[in-house]
């Protein structure tokens, strides 16, 4: 019998000027068609990412008022609906990472507990049943491994001598170009497709 468990529906990187730097969208399981496809359009995901900015701002103000400073991991930002939830992390330079999780994004089947991955259209067996069982409701800190991997990928991007961060988040605070690095896009794809509840490294 098939069991649905969480997967990443979208990864977003937002610049310090609240400008979108990168968005990766991943397919989720659709029981109506028994296939994998995104649960929202790119525009809808863009709006969901924008909706997290107010939460980031509010949490930052609360941290300043409490004297705790920048905590980095903001955890659950908000539940979008009964299926999607947004989690956030802010770097000390003001770049924000957002993960939108689909609580029913992947499907596991059979007594072996083998499951399919989101990136291959549901054809490749991958994750053990223990991870699927752990995915019923996410535990505190479940996204830390994702944020750590996203931050590592972003740091590798900054180390590229041909990458100019000021083109993407200008000091003047107006606009900025999106990240077009193929390697960075591949890293985000690997993170989004590789994560499942209970994973300890990506």
Image (cartoon, helix red, strand yellow):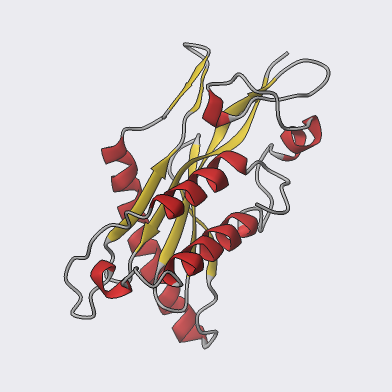
Relative placement, left or right, of 193 versus 15 is right
Q: Position of residue 7 (x, y in %)?
A: 57, 37
Which residue shows up at 28% across the image and 57% down it?
A: 178
Q: Where is residue 146 in the image (x, y as percent from the top left)?
A: 59, 54
Q: Is residue 15 left or right of residue 127?
A: left
In this image, 43 relative to 107: left or right?
A: left
The picture places residue 162, in percent across and down from the top left corner, at 34, 69
Q: Nearer the viewer, residue 25 or 56?
A: 25
Q: Which residue in the rendered view is the most extreme toward the front?
A: 161
Is 61 rendered above or below residue 80?
A: below
Q: Which residue is drawn at 65% across and 46% down?
A: 138
Q: Identify which residue, 80 or 199, lies in the foreground.
A: 199
Give the quarter of the image for residue 177. bottom left
| Relative horizontal placement of residue 57, taking residue 131 as reference (left or right) | left
Label tally: 0
Q: Which quarter of the rendering shows the N terminus?
A: top right
On screen, 38 above or below 160?
A: above
Answer above or below: position of 143 versus 158: above
Q: Which residue is drawn at 53% across and 12% down?
A: 34
Q: Where is residue 126 in the image (x, y as percent from the top left)?
A: 71, 30
């Amino acid at each position: 019998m098939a069991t649905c468990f969480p997967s990443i529906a979208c990864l977003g990187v937002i610049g310090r000027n609240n400008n979108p730097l990168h968005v990766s969208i991943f397919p989720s399981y659709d029981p109506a068609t028994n296939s994998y496809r995104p649960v929202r359009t790119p525009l809808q995901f863009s709006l969901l990412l924008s909706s997290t900015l107010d939460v980031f701002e509010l949490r930052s103000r609360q941290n300043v008022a409490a004297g705790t400073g920048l905590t980095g991991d903001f955890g659950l930002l908000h539940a979008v609906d009964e299926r999607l939830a947004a989690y956030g992390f802010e770097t000390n330079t003001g770049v924000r990472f957002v993960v939108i999780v689909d609580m029913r994004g992947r499907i596991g089947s059979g007594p072996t507990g083998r499951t399919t991955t989101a990136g291959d259209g549901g054809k490749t067996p991958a994750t053990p049943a223990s991870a699927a069982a752990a995915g019923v409701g996410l535990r505190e800190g479940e996204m830390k491994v994702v944020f750590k991997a996203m931050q590592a990928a972003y740091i590798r991007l900054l180390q590229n001598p041909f990458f100019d961060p000021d083109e993407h988040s200008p000091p003047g605070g107006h606009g900025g170009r999106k990240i077009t690095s193929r390697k960075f896009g591949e890293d985000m794809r690997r993170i989004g497709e590789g994560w499942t509840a209970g994973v300890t490294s990506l």
